[in-house]
Amino acid sequence: MGYSADIVVIGSGIGGLTAAALLQERGFSTITLEKNAVPGGSCSSFKRAGYTFDAGASVFYGFSDNDRYGTLNLHDRIFRKLGIEVPVIPDPVQIHYHLPDAVDIPVYYHKEKFLSGLIERFPREERGIRAFYRELESVHEILSSLPAGSLEDPVHILSVAGDHPSKVFALALKTFRSMGKTARHYVSDKTLLRFFDMEAYSWAVQDALATPLVNAGICLADRHLGGIHYPVGGSGAIPEALCGGIRKFGGKVLFNTEVSEILVTNGKAEGVRLSNGEVITARAVISNATVWDTCNRLLKDTRYRISDDRYHMAPSWFQMFLGVDASIIPDDFNVHHIFVDDWKGYSMPGGTIYLSIPSLLDPTVAPAGKHVFHAFVTDEKNRWKNLQLRKSAYVDAKKAYAATLLKRIEKLLPGLRDAVELDILATPLTHERYLNRYNGTYGAQLFAGQNVLQKPQNRTAVRNLFAAGDSTFPGQGVIAVTYSGVSCASCIARKLGNPLDYL
């Protein structure tokens, strides 16, 4: 192949694509390498029999048309900078929770409507509920007033601290607090505290005590300000648009191109080796892989290896992609749901069921008279590792597990099993194989009690090797990995002598 570039990006996840697009627009040359035929990783889409399925996320922040939301309005700002348009549809309800103890709460875009419903269920905790969510808003207000940049860029840090000293100090204090401990300062009802655990678990796959207050402030406040949106045509529209931006400014995105090794000489990354043996050289390398895949698979020097327990390894997923008859879905049914039928097992594999029906917002992703139905639960590779892919025992095990989940979901949608016309099932083995993610994990997370700033940043132990994606600060979720991409691009651009303009 014989390519060379200023920056080589391993993987076309949203973090890596964001970094590549911003760097390319700034004048650096980039090559993004993707082992699959489509971009996006966990934020990609795929088509079957007229249905467009989201491989992962379908709840999207960052598309507000109001710039007063600052760093949290990243998607809109990035695409505007690239001169790319991504049409989106607003979703009036982020998530509808169906939980034990008669907790049935839709989270409306309109904050007061949501709070009123929560207070109606927990009337004695009204003061605490309002104080807790106001605390989350205070985090959002600070973050949205600060420009996005790298925490490893001393020029950026000094500039922000000089311009906003009181806000930076207040934010620094909040990094030592968890969402759960903050909630317990305001409320005492055990069921309400479990609801707050689900508010964290819905996106972080950790309870509130293990979730940093700063991360919670981003997600649980911005949904009532910037709001939740869905890209027309499915989640894959976001990575496709980023690829369009990269190409618009002269960059390359190469598909069906797998990286087998990050090339390091004297502690310095100098490029990558492809699975076919070809080499691409670069001034800097960005890995969008998990921290375990980067350090233990792509870096061949054992001095860089990290143990499985260096960070908390988030679980993987079992997913059901279904095409269903539209008649099974009630007219007033919301797009996104979380269902728990037993508090004791909500955080265990399979304990919490996530549901998404994006065709309720965007009919173009399903044939006429049909709906796209995506249901998924946490899972672990160990439950499937003794089964061989595509063999009959593996297929039968997938179908049997899917049947148990569909039976549970029928408590919300009676008759669902009979309405299924297409089913595609994915296990942690699928995630590991397709996404090149160690054990199919959702990513690296902090242990309870760790400061959010202890999350890996963009720099690594190898000079000129940088990281983006959910293994880096701030963590899981599309808007979070987008921030990691902005931060990574900012760090590299400063190092290579042509700093980015703030978004």
Image: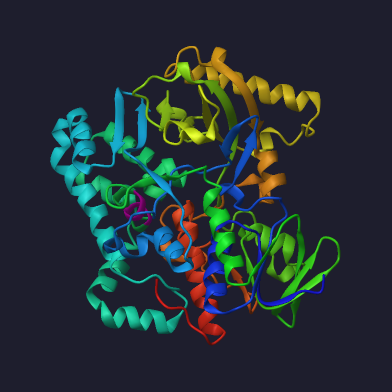
Image quarter where the N terminus lies is bottom right
Total marks placed: 0
Image quarter where the C terminus lies is bottom left
Task: Please say if 89 is above or below 31.
Answer: above
Task: Please say if 162 is above or below 472.
Answer: below
Q: Nearer the viewer, residue 381 or 254?
A: 254
Tell me the chief SS of the magenta region: helix
Can I make out residue 451 in this image? no
Is residue 217 inside the magenta stretch? yes
The quadrant in which residue 452 appears is bottom left
On screen, residue 348 versus residue 114, left or right, reads right
On screen, residue 268 versus residue 207, left or right, reads right
Q: Position of residue 57 (x, y in %)?
A: 50, 44
Is residue 42 inside the magenta stretch? no
Q: Position of residue 17 (x, y in %)?
A: 57, 62
Q: Nearer the viewer, residue 470 or 205?
A: 470
Task: Please say if 236 is above or below 170.
Answer: above
Q: Position of residue 252 (x, y in %)?
A: 67, 67
Task: Please say if 81 is above or below 292.
Answer: below
Residue, far bottom: 497
Give the residue displayed 33% in from the left and 23% down from the top: 332
Q: Which residues are magenta?
A: 215-219
Q: Position of residue 172 (x, y in %)?
A: 32, 69
Q: Nearer the viewer, residue 166 or 283?
A: 283
Can I make out residue 164 in this image? yes
